[in-house]
Image: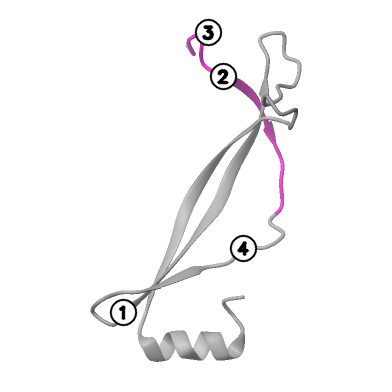
Amino acid sequence: MIPSSQPRGKLVGFKPLQERFSYYALDDGTVLGIKPAVVKVYRLQNPDNSPAFSPDGTPAYFYQTQNITQVLTPDEYKSIKADGISE
């Protein structure tokens, strides 16, 4: 059972419009690529089940993500940057 102080929400469908990696050069020469991928989105609800809003009036959401990573050599990174794949 969820405690009453726990936020409530309704699962919302979604489709990715754009997902990009962020790349980091590690001290050992490896390139680490990381991108978050959204796996679930919930539209938060008030106790009366009406949609919740943040203090500035925007709709309130909760989302779950999973990190996707890739480990590249410097040459592999140069190759994907040249092909425009990481954009």
> Measured along the vertical axis of the image, is residue 49 above or below residue 68?
above
- Residue 50 at x, y percent in the picture: 76, 16
Would residue 39 appear left or right of 59 to someone viewing this image?
Answer: left
Q: Which mark is residue 7?
A: 2
Q: CA distance from mark 2 to mark 4?
A: 28 Å
- Residue 28 % position (x, y): 23, 79
Along the polypeptide, which appears first: circle 4 or circle 1? 4
Q: Earlier in the sequence, mark 1 or mark 2?
A: 2
Crowd band around label 4 with a 10 angstrom C-alpha radius: few (<14), some (14–19), many (20+) = few
Circles 2, 4 touching at the beta carbon (< 8 Å): no
Q: Residue at x 47, y 50 (%)?
A: 66
* Cα gap from disc 1 to disc 2, whole angstroms: 41 Å
Q: At label 4, which amino acid type do we have?
A: Glu
Drawn side of residue 80 relative to residue 50, left or right: left
Task: Return the disc, 4 or 3, that comes first in the chain's sequence.
Answer: 3
Of the residues shown, which amino acid type is indicated by label 3? Ser
Q: Return the residue at label 3.
A: 4
Distance from Cα at disc 4 to Cα at disc 1: 22 Å
- Magenta stretch: give its range: 2-15
Residue at 35 percent across and 85 percent down: it is 73
